[in-house]
Amino acid sequence: MAAPGTKSRLFRCVKSILYALLFITISILTIATLRTFSLNVNVGLQLADWEKTNQIRFDISQRQREEVFTNFKEAIRIPTVSYSPTDINATALHEFSRLLRKAFPTVFSSSLVQHEVVADYSHLFTVQGSQPDLVPYMLLAHIDVVPASESDGWDAPPFSAKEIDNFIYGRGTLDDKECVMGILQALEYLLLKGYRPQRGFYIGLGHDEEVSGLNGALNIVRLLKQRNVHLSFLLDEGLLVVDGVMKGLDGPAALIGVSEKGSATVKLSVTSAPGHSSMPPRESSIGILAAAVKRLEDNPMPMLFGQGPERGTFEHLAHKFIFPIRFLASNLWLFAPIVGRLLALKPETNAFSRTTTAVTMFNAGVKVNVLPSVAEAYVNFRIHSAQSLQEVLDLVDSTVGDQRVKVEVVDGFDPLPVSSYSETSYGFQIIKKSILDVFPQLTVAPGICVANTDSRHFKDLVADIYRFIPIWAKAGDAQRIHGINERISKKNYEDIVGFYFTLIQNCDVKELPETHSGVHEF
Ligand SMILES: CCCCCCCC/C=C\CCCCCCCC(=O)N[C@@H](CC(N)=O)C(=O)O
Ligand SMILES: [Zn+2]
Ligand SMILES: [Zn+2]
């Protein structure tokens, strides 16, 4: 039996531990609560004293407004579909080149603009700046589109550019002809209004982005490398404005993609002896392959939420979330695993949390009474920023774990580097300022592009690559990209032209101003 002194020492010891735990919990909750109410990283340069460069207002006449929509609709009606790297629509691409010349006569005749056709159907515009010491920047877009078939359930034929309730319907209205036509339309009107850029810039229009850009974008890169071109930053398609896309986020937000996920396509195949279906083996090639595919689906890649640029998205938007999401998002140091698990519940947001696994093709068999000699499946992974291609391939091997299943890598690349998005990052801040000049109601945040873009081919040429178009996406709109009823509102398209009109002028800013907080410190 323990002595009474030992008992009370034990009691005091337990009491001290409980007090210590209570103190730690209260401290953590106090820090978390303070961060919840003070974390607002969306301030800074907006209050600073910017050099005034955007003097020309985007005021267009009614006739010009009609011209803007006529040009855009003509672009949508040309079926520049890419099926595979060797199956593109050359006739449509030629027709598109003719449309560009017709729609933008000032761009094509200006002595400030040099135009080159690259790899037969892609385009490179070099716009000369009056101050050669300013490092040029680049705007990128693509002309080609993915296939579309009206019978999938479109409300209008996908190459009709039909107007329904002030929306223009058609393949390419979001991906990516609004960007191609928006950039050139803005430049056309700027030149017409007598604008002469101080900082030079390039406009690249690829013709095979939807099938990897190995002819268009890659040859534009080769040309710029040969010419020893240095770029300050590059802006391509990728992310957009989300308005009601994510539950709990109060108000619309513009997400600028500061990186994009890596990718891997893996072919799995199983071969077995063909023969009569009346004498089947215990396991067929199809059964073995299906089990391997199921293992990949049942064992998703590890949860990595918070270890890539998606952390910046939630930290920047934390103050715009409703309670209790605001509490969680303001304290990812503590709650990242919980937030990651919540995001994993929906496909659009699961893509932020991990490398995704998509089984996209499955082929086997030729006849009902013939045992198939081969079964094959393709699995496409989009790799989280905190994982490498090799790590994903190693996990695929161990998860498949069956010698009878041959695993071959069809293609793949690592996640792209993360571009800077600090207060001293020229490209990010100029894009952010241009967004807020046109859409003052938005909160701007960095983001990760979950799909891939032509900009990835430029990674050795320029460190700061951004992916953003001010497409206004409401709940369900993201599914229209590559899906049915792709459409854009007329107001949104006009604002996109206005955005590039503003951005081009803002890029004449020589250097970023001192931040507002910095000004007060001195
Ligand atoms: C607060 C968070 C809300 C998050 C919502 C995010 C919604 C994201 C929505 C849309 C992303 C759209 C991505 C568009 C880019 C498409 C580029 C593309 O299709 N690329 C192809 C071809 C290629 N270059 O490899 C691809 O397969 O990735
Ligand atoms: Zn695209
Ligand atoms: Zn696309």
Image: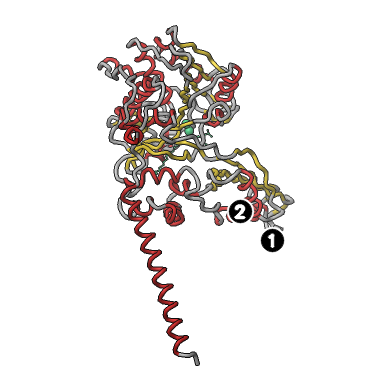
Label 2 Cα neighbours within 10 Å, binned few <14 / some 14-19 / many ≥20: some
Using the numbered discs, state the Cα–Cα distance from disc 1 to disc 2 in whole angstroms: 14 Å
- Provide residue 19's location: percent of width, then percent of height: 39, 71
- At x 59%, y 39%, the residue is 414
Q: Which residue is mark 2?
A: 290
Work out whether 11 lies above or below 216: below
User: Which amino acid lies under the numbered mark 1 shown in the image of this protein?
Assistant: Arg
Colour option used:
secondary structure
Q: Give residue 60's position: percent from left, percent from top.
A: 28, 17
- What x and y, as percent, mark residue 441? 28, 35
- Give above or below for 173 relative to 318: above
| Residue 282 in which image quadrant | bottom right
Nearest the eye: 23 or 242:
23
Q: Is residue 13 left or right of residue 47?
A: right
Between 383 and 318, the residue placed more toward the observer is: 318
**SS assignment at label 1:** loop
**What residue lies at 43% left-to-right and 77% top-to-bottom?**
14
Q: Residue furthest left?
A: 62
Q: Which residue is mark 1?
A: 282
Q: Residues within 10 Å of mark 1 (few under 14, many from 20)?
A: few
